[in-house]
Image (cartoon, coloured by chain):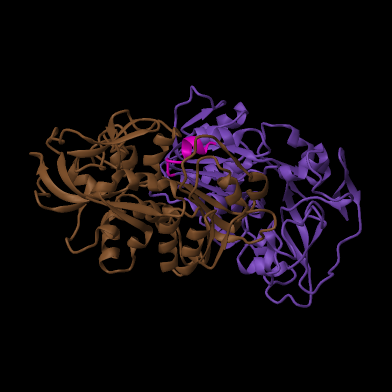
Chain colours: A purple, B brown
């Protein structure tokens, strides 16, 4: 089969590799119908981190049809269409018992990092019954492939933590796919949302889809304060510090970013403001809820998809990441 | 009348001063039966802050009997016994509308700082109807005087923010009166509580009253993690940073301390741990609930009182603060 293999910093290949096989009785094999990229797939190529092992197939997001199941699999069968969640979980360790699936002692964020991932014609999904969701055949790939990561990331980290009787205004820092996913949910919950970003094309898209105001800087001239501030950038770019400036009395700051260094927390200003901060990684425990929202057309995740490529253009699709005007890129095999 | 007047750093006086009078129609005058001290009363004397205006009567905690009421006061009358809340609030500004009483544009934490306070034979309480609670005459001063500050501080900042179905273990950093108040509530809610402090006599008191373990240091040899960590020290002593080390997955960190400088937030370690941080100041909105808990003997706040002095020993009582083995000091006039 063909697969997108990470060789080393600056080197990837759409290579011919062996098909995956069932290794453990709880495995399933999924014939991939389509996949999408996340920034986590691109950082190792840029040399920004070394999360992907050399010669590993990349990717943690995909939709496809089951082509093989292990002996212990009883609730899924060959032919089922599924979305693969980006967190593999055994449901059998102490972390899974606390629903900390991302920290699963036998899984976690392993697809496309330590285990071969979804950017391939076939992918082996460990603990398949826990780690995928069955999806109806009539739903568009561009909607359901967002279930793998970007929808539950926004939904679990933000929407499940917010009391919408108290949150009427929000700022989203970051104009990428996570910011957009968060935005679509907040707009659905009648929140007045401002976007802080750096890419005018994307900011215009937010505006056209209901954002109240958009800004390209956060500085002392900006006096707006919000009930909710969602930081979707991370990577030690000063956005956590900036987010604190936007926080109103009784406000909530949620950071979805990944950080490699400690940040500055302005307790000298915030100690008396009754604020709340949440950090979080998704545990992909909300797929049934999210699928129902797609089926009822309450949410339209295909809005997060900027371009769709075919199987002959996988490398082009991968490098489309360099184009900062795009949200998610999907490949249809 | 006699009153404890703050002159300047290092100089206080139990002085003869003029009695307070009704100034605004919403004022009340309370003849003080007893008061207590907080660290906020001592910091200016030590030169640690300049929150108290020179020649101001100190104090924001007291119980007494109403001796005069303004024309607009209808729900309180001369002779009513009341506890004075440490936050004065007009109930008429936009901050009061959001129940941010501590930030009231016409009040806030003014008693004993910008307005004459409670360490006196009489005190004028602005917006008296909003800022005191009527209390039965049979309740002990040592119980009800804790309503002014230390009980609502712990109750509103901690107990009202915690879901006790999820919190089974807690660490309290700080062995002072706020730590003890928090402890008494947590113990009542069946939480297993460890105390981190520096004063062995006080740590022994915690232990004797149901603390699980006590520690005098937090370092890398300490591997305990908690569902809840309450930081009750503040003052830039590194306790917020230390508190983060004690936080378990999905944990909650509540800081009740006062900070003058930014602190270090270890997002590099905590970004994926689904943690929550709360900051807060009390708004003294829970006095009816707390009074009911005293009446039903669900809580016994007199445990927080280490010593009671008479009116001839006010200065001795004030300087008892230097004795770090004591919790709260009460003066009975």
Magenta stretch: residue A271 in it? yes
- Residue found at x 67% / y 60%: B223
Numbered marks: total: 0
Q: Nearer the viewer, residue A167 or A31?
A: A167
Seen in the picture, residue B235 relative to A5 is either above or below; the reply is: above
Q: Nearer the viewer, residue B255 or A11?
A: B255
Q: Quadrant of residue A232?
A: top right
* Residue A4 in sight in this render: yes
- Percent x, y for residue B186? 44, 63
Quadrant including the N terminus of chain A: bottom right
Magenta stretch: residue A138 in it? no
Q: Nearer the viewer, residue B180 or A28?
A: B180
Give the residues in magenta: A266-274
* Residue B86 in sight in this render: no
- Percent x, y for residue A304? 61, 43
- Percent x, y for residue B273? 62, 54
| Residue B317 appears left or right of A56 | left
| Residue B163 appears left or right of A320 | left
Q: Nearer the viewer, residue A112 or B276?
A: B276
- Residue found at x 19% / y 33%: B17
- Residue found at x 53% / y 68%: B212
- Percent x, y for residue A76? 70, 71
């Amino acid at each position: 089969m063909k697969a997108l293999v990470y060789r080393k910093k600056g080197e990837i290949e759409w290579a011919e590799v062996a098909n995956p096989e069932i290794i453990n009785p709880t495995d399933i094999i999924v014939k991939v119908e389509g996949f999408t990229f996340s920034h986590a797939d691109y950082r190792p190529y840029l040399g920004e981190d070394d999360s992907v092992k050399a010669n590993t197939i990349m990717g943690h997001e995909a939709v496809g049809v089951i082509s093989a199941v292990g002996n212990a699999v009883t609730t899924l069968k060959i032919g089922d269409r599924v979305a693969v969640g980006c967190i593999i979980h055994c449901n059998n360790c102490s972390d899974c018992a606390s629903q900390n699936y991302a920290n699963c002692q036998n899984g976690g964020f392993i697809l496309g990092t330590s285990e071969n991932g979804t950017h391939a014609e076939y992918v082996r999904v460990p603990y398949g019954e826990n780690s995928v969701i069955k999806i109806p055949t009539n739903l568009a790939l561009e909607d359901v492939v967002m279930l793998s990561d970007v929808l539950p990331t926004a939904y679990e980290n933000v929407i499940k933590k917010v009391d919408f009787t108290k949150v009427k205004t929000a700022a989203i820092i970051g104009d990428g796919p996570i910011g957009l996913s968060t935005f679509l949910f907040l707009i659905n919950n009648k929140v007045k949302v401002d976007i802080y970003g750096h890419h005018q094309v994307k900011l215009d898209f937010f505006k056209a889809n209901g954002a109240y105001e958009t800004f390209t800087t956060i500085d002392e001239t900006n006096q707006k304060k919000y009930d909710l501030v969602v930081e979707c950038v991370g990577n030690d770019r000063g956005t956590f510090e900036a987010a604190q400036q936007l926080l109103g009395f009784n406000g909530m700051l949620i950071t979805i970013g990944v950080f490699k260094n400690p940040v500055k927390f302005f307790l000298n200003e915030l100690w008396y403001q009754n604020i709340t901060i949440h950090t979080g990684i998704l545990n992909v425990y909300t797929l049934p809820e999210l699928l129902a929202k797609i089926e009822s057309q309450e949410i339209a995740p295909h809005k997060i998809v900027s371009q769709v490529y075919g199987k002959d253009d996988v490398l082009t699709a991968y490098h489309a990441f360099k184009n900062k005007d795009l949200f998610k890129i999907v490949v249809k095999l």
